[in-house]
Amino acid sequence: MLVQALYNIVDSMFVAQLSENALTAVSLAFPAQNLMIAVATEPEASVSMLLSQEISAKEL
């Protein structure tokens, strides 16, 4: 998420040179983009945790 935030900062700098409306659009999309990333990574982390617990339980 740090890389995504840095990308959005650099993107905002370039888009700000185009117009104020373009910068507003990028600024409004930033929270939605973070939400999509969070929703996408949470199930992945949960499944990884459950899978690792299952594998370690079989090894004992």
Image (cartoon, rainbow, N blue to C red):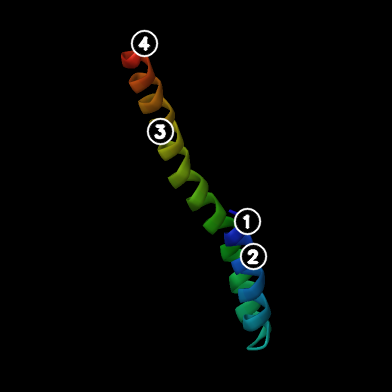
Residue at (52% x, 46% y) in the render? 38
- Measured Cα–Cα span from mark 1 to mark 4: 37 Å
Going from the N terminus, do you reach mark 2 or mark 3 first?
Answer: 2
Residue 56: x %, y % from top left:
38, 19
Mark 2 belongs to which amino acid? Leu
- Residue placed under numbered mark 3 in the picture: 48
- Residue placed under numbered mark 1 in the picture: 2
- Measured Cα–Cα span from mark 4 to mark 2: 43 Å
- Residue placed under numbered mark 2 in the picture: 6
Name the image quarter holding residue 48.
top left
- Measured Cα–Cα span from mark 4 to mark 3: 19 Å
- Residue placed under numbered mark 4 in the picture: 60
Direction top: furthest residue: 60
Callout 4: SS: loop
Does the residue at mark 4 contact the one at mark 2 (Cβ under 8 Å)? no
How dense is the environment of label 3, judged by Cα within 10 Å: few (below 14), some, or many (20 and up)?
few
Residue at (36% x, 27% y) in the render? 51
